[in-house]
Image (tube, helix red, strand yellow):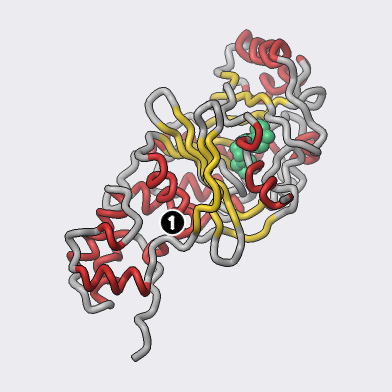
Amino acid sequence: MSPPPRIPFLESHPKEWPTLFQSLGAQPFQGKIAAKWVFKKGVSSWEAMTDLPEQLRNELSQSSPLLLSQLERRYDSPDGATKLLLRYPDGASTEAVGMPGTQGQTICIGTQVGCPVRCQFCASGTDGLERNLTRAEILEQVLWLRQEMGDFHRLVVMGMGDPGFNLEPTLNALESLLDFEGMDLGARRVTLSTVAPINTIPALANWQHNINIALSLHSASEELRHELIPGLPKRSIRETLEEMEQLFAKNGREYTIEYVLLSGVNDSTQSAHDLADLLRDKRCHINLIPYNPVDGLGFSRPPDSVCGDFLNVLKTQSLSATLRKSLGASAEAACGQLRRRSKLG
Ligand code: SAH
């Protein structure tokens, strides 16, 4: 007799699990029980689901393991951040990060292996895009983090890749987390960050969940933004901001503008004034991120005084802005760097 086929449970919405169980000859309510174990209780092995019959658990463990990725390395940074290096069966790897926050843990997940956007200062895109992650692979990062580090308060989709270039699997994965039959995570606790390729923001505006959206801008100048983000097919900043304003009109939620401060590149007082001019009257909050240097990319972090002056220009013009205290900046813990190091051997 041939072994039962593998059912990729995490590729399906948790509300479909009863039907999947039925297709295996099990009871639909058992699918509901299993979804509860995974999404509500953070359990990712069939063996642990003690209120399912032992034979069913054994069969599922054999045929359909929930997690396909392996935890290759755990790195605990001295500032409290923890990074997990996950390896998928085809050899591709990604990072998932947990950081302590004021109200509990924040976790950060990626959406692609490598990144097509190739921001010149970022470790994630130095080799371009390797491949997209699937819905299940995006979810596995959350399940691994929960297993290793317990519950979390906030989820940020700010890891490797850009969700705008892999939107459908990303939103499907978030659906499993946001839906009440899944993890039942409040939309306010989720933030997605993107450079906003065409159609991304309108698609998010039409989506049923009002999560927080962050736009990575990095410059008020079209030319400099294009130089810094060469993988983003050229489109005007004004058009992108109009989309952001429409998103606000639709969901009533202020959006975030992310601006990585790079020494001598976009950190001058003039750049701050240009940014203030661009964003005056916009319904956004500006998050200034002092750069976490990545070896070999040729960018550096401005001195604290320069970051402070930049912030003050925005504030004196009554813009809502903060300077981020970067977590995980030590050694290998900045964005994309653990994986980069593992690739460099
Ligand atoms: N592709 C998405 C998610 C990237 S990570 C996006 O671009 O929005 C989230 C933020 O961290 C982005 O604004 C990104 O530009 C920034 N970032 C990337 N590498 C960084 C580094 N080394 N130091 C500081 N910020 C960085």
Q: Residue 71 location, x and y as percent?
A: 50, 53
For ligand 1, give the image quadrant: top right
- 46 left or right of 194 in image: left
Q: Is mark 1 on a helix, strand or loop?
A: helix
Residue, disc 1: 172
Please give the name of the residue rendered at 62% of the width and 8% of the height, measured from the top-left corner: 316
Q: Which amino acid does label 1 sit on?
A: Asn
Q: Compared with residue 124, is residue 334 higher up or lower down, i.e. above or below?
A: above
> Can you tell which quarter of the image residue 293 is in?
top right
- Of residue 316 and residue 115, the one placed in the foreground of this image is 115
Q: Compared with residue 332, is residue 137 higher up or lower down, i.e. above or below?
A: below
The answer to whether one can see residue 195 in this image is no
Q: Residue 112 location, x and y as percent?
A: 59, 54
- Number of dots carrying numbers: 1
- 290 left or right of 141 in image: right
> Can you tell which quarter of the image residue 8 is in?
bottom left
The answer to whether one can see residue 203 in this image is yes
- Tell me the crowding category of disc 1: few under 14, some 14 to 19, or many 20 or more residues within 10 angstroms, Cα based: some
> Can you tell which quarter of the image residue 48 is in?
bottom left
Please give the name of the residue rendered at 21% of the width and 68% of the height, measured from the top-left corner: 54
Q: Compared with residue 108, is residue 259 higher up or lower down, i.e. above or below?
A: above
Please give the name of the residue rendered at 77% of the width and 31% of the height, measured from the top-left corner: 221
- Of residue 244 and residue 296, the one placed in the foreground of this image is 296
- Ligand 1 closer than 8 Å to the CB at disc 1? no
Q: Residue 170 location, x and y as percent?
A: 49, 53
Of all residues, the one furthest to the bottom in this rendering is: 1
| Image quarter hosting the N terminus | bottom left
Q: Residue 239 location, x and y as percent?
A: 65, 40
